[in-house]
């Protein structure tokens, strides 16, 4: 498609000179510097927590190596920062992540932000999880007492609301014990119900729920502490995938329960058990057990709520359940024809006990709603829509990606809801507020960039994590309607001469606005500039964001070496309205590549100094898949790098894949045929570098094995790099440095004049 310069002037936010202007660097930016522990900005604080009495905000601060750290708190009344737990004690109570010997466990903890400590309800004690062993820490005298000593880890520990009891999961079962010492009581016994004990999870979260539904816990105390509501997952029908550790003389095998597209999912059901022991009462919600129960909890002591999502994920039902009789009623249904319903955390029951908030994109964009129900007879009728709280051409969305909670806090006394959205710019995130009557929507944060807020329980204070594209993260403690005080600031990066990316706008072939970003090299070239396209392209992430560069600092190194780096968010990526996100449903690959190529053609029309004969593409995960798809469906790319790609959607997990592509048996979906990349290996254009970690439990190494075999059979030469024992993120300074140097060498070989 041809575009004139006059047309392009409408599409671009910014124009550019021949090369980017940047400060003269005082310090060379290197791959080793950006992948080192702490990077160039220093290690950020970890494990943010508010004390239950709302007086303190705590966090772990470690040095760059991660070996040495302390637990600090900031006093809300004074803004003063003080030590809560010393380095010596923290080394035992919360060992650094680097001490974990297992790569999969490291990735689980870091990917799902597993906390190493929590506050007790009295705000005078802390509970530490020291690699599965629980410790109670008294703040006043600094005394730590072990609570568990079992060789098996005790996971997902939770205090009862009054703090007198502690629940946790061990070997797939729920246990309870007094929080100040005493014998434990086992509440569930999977062994007595199933010969294969490892197949029955009581209150425990499996891999696919954690990864794709953002589930972090599957059991909850009743408000009075007398009962525990939990989800039981029966994985006996779920197929297993072999993960092999090839390092030892005799390799170790771990069979991972992993439902792929069309496979049997875990069978789930909700149960209530007394916290002092007894028989579980199972709750009947729906006769169809081939569903998901992604969210549930207590409305009050006698009333339970639960969400049930159908397998196709286009209908979400909200149930209220009588905790004593088990009787249930569907009180609300959310559906999305020709789309899907994202699971989120925005269902929140107000203190009044008869209203709740709800998130929906029923009007075309993700917005907040307020419902009411009969407090004295909650099962007597459906919930009633009171009003839409937010409205407009923007998304109420979490700071990072799909399905996250947009609501940060609710101050019911003041009648205010605090939420994060992209109202001002889809590439930014700002904190806003709106009254519960739907009036007075207004911004709380204003500095352009990305804001992520953690509120105290009383919604009077919050911690703001802020960054922009060339501004590293900083943390500030803020009072609502008042001043902010800086808590932590990253190291300055001005002396690295970072190149400012240019934010651009394009149009897809159907006229849809697309946001892009371009980094130009700092020095005027003697030849036309080779271009590297960085792509993700899927529903889980935006690449064009006004936030700190982070891992994308690698692109700065490429730009300083003479390359232009370009990225664009095609249709299907988050942060935009329902039509934009769901347009790729059941036809993965086609529309995404159309948008990528349309933006690329417009870019070349505007920037004549870019070399159309020296173009490369690279990406990771979904971006790895898109890179392979582009190299087999377009001939413009001279080289490409595909890291940890899905090469056939039949290989990937059920929830993510079926949400976007339907079931493999669905004849209306073209995704499974179009994205069966091994069958299209004969169409490969350009020089390919294929990369994967051998222990990837997310996108299995199987994908790259199948692609490798197909490329060989079709006589296609390519390069392959396998990182032994590494998971999806290929973590670790040594491995990351090796990988980025290999990518750099690959581009130098095929793109340099």
Image: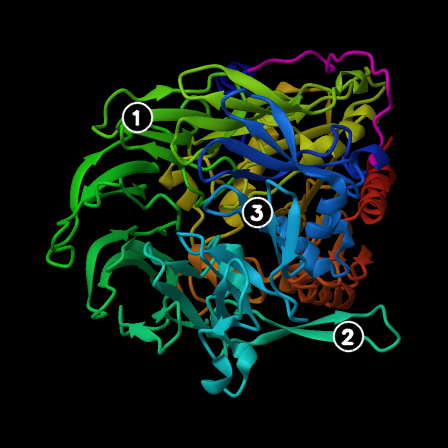
Q: CA distance from mark 3 to mark 1?
A: 34 Å
Colour theme: rainbow
Q: Is residue 83 above or below residue 247?
A: above
Residue on which disc 2 sits: 252
Please give the name of the residue rendered at 70% of the width and 36% of the height, measured from the top-left corner. Answer: 551
Element type at mark 3: strand
Q: Which one is in front, 555 or 183?
A: 183
Q: Which one is in front, 192 or 642?
A: 192
Q: What crowding class fits label 2: few (fewer than 14 Cα within 10 Å), some (14-19), or many (20 or more)?
A: few
Q: Which one is in front, 530 or 497?
A: 497
Please give the name of the residue rendered at 16% of the width and 48% of the height, measured from the top-left corner. Answer: 373
Q: Where on the picture, by quarter, is residue 752?
A: top right
Q: CA distance from mark 3 to mark 2?
A: 37 Å
Q: Position of residue 276 (x, y in %)?
A: 39, 70
Q: What crowding class fits label 1: few (fewer than 14 Cα within 10 Å), some (14-19), or many (20 or more)?
A: some
Residue on which disc 1 sits: 434
Q: Earlier in the sequence, mark 3 or mark 1?
A: 3
Q: Which one is in front, 479 or 492?
A: 479
**What segment is highlighted magenta in the picture?**
14-31
């Amino acid at each position: 498609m041809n575009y004139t310069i006059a047309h392009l002037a409408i599409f671009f936010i910014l124009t550019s000179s021949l090369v980017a202007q940047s400060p003269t660097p005082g310090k060379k930016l290197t791959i080793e510097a950006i992948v080192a522990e702490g990077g160039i900005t220093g290690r950020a604080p970890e494990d943010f927590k508010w004390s239950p009495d709302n007086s303190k905000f705590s966090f772990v601060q470690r040095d760059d190596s991660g070996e040495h750290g302390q637990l600090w708190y900031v006093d809300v009344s004074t803004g003063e920062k003080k030590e809560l737990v010393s380095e010596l004690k923290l080394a035992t109570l919360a060992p650094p992540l680097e001490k974990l010997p297992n790569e999969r466990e490291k990735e689980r903890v870091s990917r799902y932000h597993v906390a190493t400590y929590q506050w007790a309800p009295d705000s005078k004690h802390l509970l530490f999880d020291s690699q599965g062993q629980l410790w109670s820490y008294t703040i006043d005298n600094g005394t730590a007492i072990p609570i568990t000593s079992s060789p098996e880890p005790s996971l997902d520990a939770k205090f009862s609301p009054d703090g007198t009891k502690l629940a946790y999961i061990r070997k797939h079962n729920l246990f309870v014990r007094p929080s100040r010492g005493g014998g434990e009581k086992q509440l569930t016994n999977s062994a007595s119900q199933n010969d294969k004990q490892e197949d029955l999870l009581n209150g425990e979260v499996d891999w696919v729920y954690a990864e794709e539904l953002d589930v972090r816990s599957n059991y909850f105390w009743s408000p009075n502490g007398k009962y525990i509501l939990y989800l039981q997952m029966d994985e006996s029908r779920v197929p297993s995938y072999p993960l092999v550790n090839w390092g030892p003389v005799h390799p170790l095998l771990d069979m991972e329960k992993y439902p792929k597209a069309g496979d049997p999912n875990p069978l789930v059901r909700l149960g209530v058990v007394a916290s002092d022991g007894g028989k579980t009462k199972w709750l009947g919600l729906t006769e169809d057990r081939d569903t998901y129960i992604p969210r549930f909890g207590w409305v009050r002591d006698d009333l339970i709520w639960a969400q049930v999502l159908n397998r196709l994920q286009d209908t979400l039902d909200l149930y209220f359940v009588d905790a004593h009789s088990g009787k249930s009623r569907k009180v609300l249904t959310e559906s999305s024809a020709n789309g899907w319903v994202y699971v989120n955390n925005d269902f929140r029951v107000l203190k009044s006990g008869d209203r709740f908030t709800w998130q929906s994109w029923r009007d075309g964009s993700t917005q907040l709603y307020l419902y009411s129900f009969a407090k004295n007879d909650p099962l007597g009728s459906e919930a009633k829509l009171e009003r839409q709280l937010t409205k407009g051409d923007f998304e109420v969305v979490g700071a990072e990606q799909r399905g996250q909670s947009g609501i940060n806090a609710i101050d019911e006394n003041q009648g205010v809801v605090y939420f994060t959205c992209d109202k001002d710019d889809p590439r930014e995130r700002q904190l806003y507020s709106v009254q519960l009557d739907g009036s007075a929507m207004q911004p709380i944060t204003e500095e352009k960039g990305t804001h992520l807020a953690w509120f105290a329980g009383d919604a009077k204070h919050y911690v703001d994590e802020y960054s922009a594209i060339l501004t590293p993260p900083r943390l500030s403690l803020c009072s609502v309607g008042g001043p902010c005080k800086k808590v932590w600031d990253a190291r300055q990066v001005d002396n690295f001469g970072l190149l400012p990316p240019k934010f651009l706008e394009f149009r897809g072939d159907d006229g849809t606005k697309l946001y892009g970003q371009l980094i130009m090299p700092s020095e005027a070239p003697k030849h036309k500039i080779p271009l590297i396209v960085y792509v993700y392209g899927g529903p889980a992430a935006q690449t064009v964001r006004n936030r700190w560069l982070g891992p994308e600092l690698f692109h700065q190194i490429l730009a300083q070496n003479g390359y232009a780096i370009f990225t664009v968010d095609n249709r299907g990526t988050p942060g935009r309205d329902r039509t934009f996100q769901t347009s790729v449903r059941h036809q993965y690959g086609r529309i995404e590549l159309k948008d990528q190529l349309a933006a690329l053609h417009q870019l070349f029309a505007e920037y004549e100094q870019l070399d159309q004969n020296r173009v490369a593409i690279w990406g990771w995960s979904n971006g790895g898949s898109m890179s392979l798809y582009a190299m087999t469906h377009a001939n413009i790319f001279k080289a490409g790098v595909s890291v940890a790609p899905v090469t056939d959607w039949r290989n990937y997990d059920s929830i993510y894949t079926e949400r976007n592509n339907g079931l493999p048996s669905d004849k209306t979906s073209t995704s499974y045929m179009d994205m069966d990349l091994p069958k299209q290996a004969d169409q490969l254009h350009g020089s390919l570098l294929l990369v994967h970690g051998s222990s990837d439990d997310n996108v299995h190494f199987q994908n790259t094995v199948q692609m490798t075999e197909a490329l060989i059979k079709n006589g296609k030469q390519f390069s392959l790099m396998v990182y032994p024992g590494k998971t999806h993120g290929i973590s670790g300074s040594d491995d990351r440095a090796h990988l980025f140097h290999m990518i750099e060498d690959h581009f130098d070989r095929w793109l340099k004049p």
